[in-house]
Image: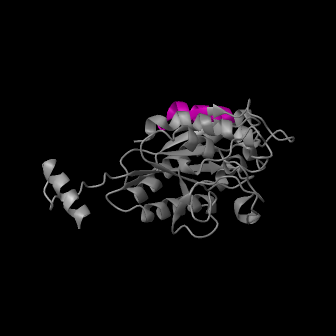
Amino acid sequence: MALAIGLASALAACGGGGDSAPPKPQPVSYQHIISYGQSLSLGGASWNAYPTDQSIPAEDPSVGLMFVSGVLPRGSMAAFTPFQDTSTEPLDESSWGIGAWGTTPLYGALLKVKDMPGVRIGSAAGRGATGIGGLSKGTPPYARLLAQVAAGKVLVKAPDTYSVPVIFWMQGEADRGALADWYEPLFLQLTKDLDADVRAITGQAAPVQILICLPATAPTIADGQRLAAAASPNVHVACDETPYPKTSEGVHLTAQGELMAGYAFGEAMRPYLR
């Protein structure tokens, strides 16, 4: 009783009454960041991570959230849990196109923007060894991406807000050798479809920004991606995989390489986190 009286007195001394309403919590902006494309977008072959690779810091789960079934959701998307990227847990290879994954570009990106307002959600939706036609509208990976957006939308309740400000794009090796002029219109159509279909779910006004990391082993595809970025205000080149550390086969990024790509994505997406 003495404690209650003391608290009431303190409120009165500050100009408040015992029946004053507590301050309303401010709405939180939940920003869902999605990594899409081929195996590099999923962290395929990059499981040489901490503590094996001492250049990779222990992951900080406070960078954001993921679905309860993982960064590559393989089950329930009915709840969020703290972000935890690295894993060697097997995947359904027929669905994901990779057998296991390690560090995706998402962790480095979320770490890079940890200081910004809002809460980030990270997930990946692509498929390894898949050309752009197999990732375009109407395909299972495309449907998987939209399902992740729909699940995120359901979990974020008003007055908090939910949006998909950016999608990372890491793809091109499966289309290696194709002409840039062939790739550009297909990629531009994909970016337009993603923007329209994602915004139809989220209700956000701002267009979805597509951030590219250019493929190191598919130079004509990289040229097509550059052409698309020049043609669309919502498509941007964030990085080039060429200088990043790679596994022994020279295509996939190591854990350190994925982290470096993620840092570049994080820097590029800062202007779009509202």
Q: Is residue 226 magenta?
A: yes
* Residue shown at 51% from the left, 41% from the top: 114
| Image location of residue 270, percent across then percent down | 48, 36
* Residue shown at 44% from the left, 64% from the top: 155
Occupied quadrant, residue 75: bottom right
* Residue shown at 58% from the left, 51% from the top: 61
Res. 233 visible in picture: no
Relative to 225, say whether 142 is above or below. below
| Image location of residue 29, percent across then percent down | 39, 50
Relative to 51, say whether 149 is above or below. below
**69 or 189: nearer the eye?**
69
Res. 93 visible in picture: yes
**Span of residues in magenta:** 222-238
Say whether residue 246 is left or right of residue 62: right
| Image location of residue 202, percent across then percent down | 41, 56
Extreme-right residue of the structure: 248
Occupied quadrant, residue 7: bottom left
* Residue shown at 21% from the left, 58% from the top: 6
**252 or 111: nearer the eye?**
111
Q: Is residue 201 magenta?
A: no
**192 or 102: nearer the eye?**
102
